[in-house]
Image (cartoon, rainbow, N blue to C red):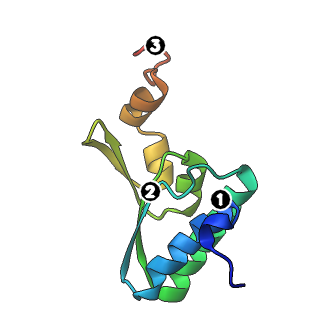
């Protein structure tokens, strides 16, 4: 109550950022790396909050994020970019098993050979 945001813990500052974005009652919310700098517990809470916001405010959320467990846990649809080029899109399960995604992000081909060793 009545505190300057920059004096709050980092995880709380991130939540305030999102709350500020919701004040304008958007129909589309862009979240750019919202899990950056958060610990495991905060990322878990963030995922729950994003799903709750989506449902409560009937939002479309465009999430740019490298935290894969968060992305896969809250997304209905995932689009994967590699150096700015779309290499896959679909449900989280479809994208996780896409050979192009595995090769781009893990550096191995689906048949087990090294692609980027």
Q: Nearer the viewer, residue 4 or 51?
A: 4
Q: Quadrant of the N terminus?
A: bottom right
Q: Residue at x 41, y 27 (%)?
A: 103
Vertical position of residue 36 compared to residue 46: above or below: above
State yes or no: discs 1 and 3 in contact (Cβ < 8 Å): no
Residue that mark 2 sits on: 91
- Estimate the spatial distance between the alpha carbons at disc 1 and disc 2, rounded to whole Å: 31 Å
Which labelled disc corresponds to residue 110? none
Which element is circle 2 on? loop
Q: Quadrant of the C terminus?
A: top left
Q: Residue at x 37, y 84 (%)?
A: 26
Q: Earlier in the sequence, mark 1 or mark 2?
A: 1
Tell me if 107 is positioned left or right of 53 in this view: left
Residue that mark 3 sits on: 113
**Within the image, what quadrant is residue 7 found in?**
bottom right
Which element is circle 1 on? helix
Q: Residue 45 at what x, y percent from top left?
A: 69, 65
- Estimate the spatial distance between the alpha carbons at disc 1 and disc 3, rounded to whole Å: 41 Å
Q: Earlier in the sequence, mark 1 or mark 3?
A: 1
Vertical position of residue 86 compared to residue 59: above or below: above
Q: Nearer the viewer, residue 78 or 10?
A: 10
Q: Residue 93 at what x, y percent from top left?
A: 51, 50
Tell me if 29 is positioned left or right of 73 in this view: left
Vertical position of residue 26 compared to residue 63: above or below: below
Q: Residue 68 at what x, y percent from top left?
A: 55, 46
Which labelled disc corresponds to residue 10? 1
- Estimate the spatial distance between the alpha carbons at disc 3 and disc 2, rounded to whole Å: 26 Å
| Image depth: mark 1 or mark 3 in front | 1
Which element is circle 3 on? loop
Q: Residues within 10 Å of mark 1 (few under 14, many from 20)?
A: few
Q: Residue 109 at what x, y percent from top left?
A: 43, 21
């Amino acid at each position: 109550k009545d505190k300057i945001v920059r004096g709050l813990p980092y995880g709380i500052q991130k939540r305030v950022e999102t709350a500020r974005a919701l004040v304008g009652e958007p129909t589309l919310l862009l979240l750019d790396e919202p899990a950056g700098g958060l610990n495991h517990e905060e990322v878990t809470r963030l995922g729950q909050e994003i799903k709750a916001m989506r449902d409560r405010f009937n939002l479309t959320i465009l999430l740019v994020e490298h935290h894969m467990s968060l992305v896969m846990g809250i997304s209905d649809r995932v689009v994967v970019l590699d150096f700015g080029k779309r290499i896959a899109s679909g449900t989280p399960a479809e994208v996780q098993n896409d050979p192009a995604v595995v090769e781009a992000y893990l550096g191995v081909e689906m048949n087990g050979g090294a692609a980027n060793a």
